[in-house]
Amino acid sequence: MSTDVTAGLLERAVQLALRAPSVHNTQPWRWRLRAREVELHADPARHLPGTDPDRRDLVISCGAALHHLRVAAAGFGGAVEIDRFPDPDHLWHLATVRLVDGQPDRAAAALFGQLARRHTDRRRYSPEPVPAAHVAALVERAGELGVVAVPVTDSAVLTRMTDVLGRAAREQRHEPGYLAELLMWTRRYADAADGVPPTAVPVRTGQWDEPELQRFPSGTLSPGRGLGPDGGLLMVLATPEDDLAARLAAGEATSAVLLTATRGGLATDPLSQAVEMPTAREGLRSALRIAEHPQLVIRLGFPAPGAPPLEPTPRRPLRSVLLHP
């Protein structure tokens, strides 16, 4: 790989990786940049103990950033290798990404243009159903990263699933610290570089059956025109194991699914709340009749007719997330 290609490549890739989704937009990652490698570290200072007691969301968020980095590097023409959990004595050092000689990952490079286009869309979706070919492509992308993607297309399964999630959402409201964290990260100060602003949360209109897991207070985002059923579907990402490595992989698969869905014209909404309660996770396994461990639920569908473009949610500047070499 020529010096012209590598100069500043990783810094530019990290800059784009900061666009990754994260729980409450906490952006719980830190990066250490060197000439030909970059380290990804989880940032425990941005852990939400009331919302995410076992740090599942923390690691999944970082996994999404890791995959965003991989896509960005490939898009800039760089080939990389990834060493996950390279230091057993420092578990929050999640990965080291190194530039290597060779051709960039073509599948990753194909998603490069979606890094700036992907936004979480919490509004209702169009009545138009998601085509089976789109769903199959998302399942395949997750499988390539060792993660099982389960689309919920059976009405009986969906009924069992929504019952489980509704109970878990009601229980979570009584968890110590949960409501305080929700308020803190959805009502940030002016010009905050993190958190979920009101402009990213739709106005509650009562005109559709909003998922009970839409936990954020009513915002200012226009929900779009038209009534009728929401044609979106839920997809559960699950892993054979439930350790740190599995959660990191789930985060990488989350990024791959979201970016692939965006390329296919779909809107997406990760629902981390669905798996933050142990009762919900076990209930999901039972409802779906799977042996794997649920890690995240993603809602996806076509944008509603007349829905205005989404504004980018804030991100911290690169200097704020870099560790000293």
Image (cartoon, rainbow, N blue to C red):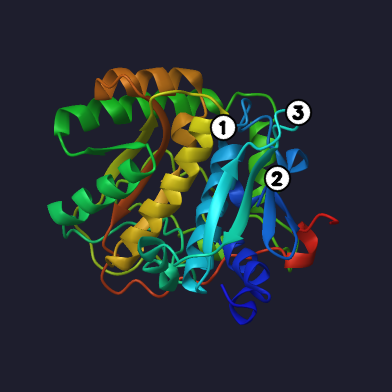
- Is residue 20 visible in this depiction of the protein? no
Residue that appears at 28% across and 22% down: 290
Give the crowd class for mark 3: few <14, some 14-19, many >=20 residues within 10 Å.
Answer: few
Q: Position of residue 68 (x, y in %)?
A: 52, 59
Q: Which residue is mark 3?
A: 89
On the rendered structure, is 190 left or right of 63?
right
Q: Nearer the viewer, residue 191 or 241?
A: 241
Q: Secondary structure at mark 3?
A: loop
Residue type for callout 3: Asp
Q: Contact, CB < 8 Å: mark 1 with mark 2?
A: no
Where is residue 73, by image quadrant?
bottom right
Q: Nearer the viewer, residue 244 or 51?
A: 244
Q: Nearer the viewer, residue 203 or 35?
A: 35
Residue 56 tag number:
1
Alpha carbons under labels 1 and 3: distance apart: 20 Å
Q: Earlier in the sequence, mark 1 or mark 3?
A: 1
Alpha carbons under labels 2 and 3: distance apart: 13 Å
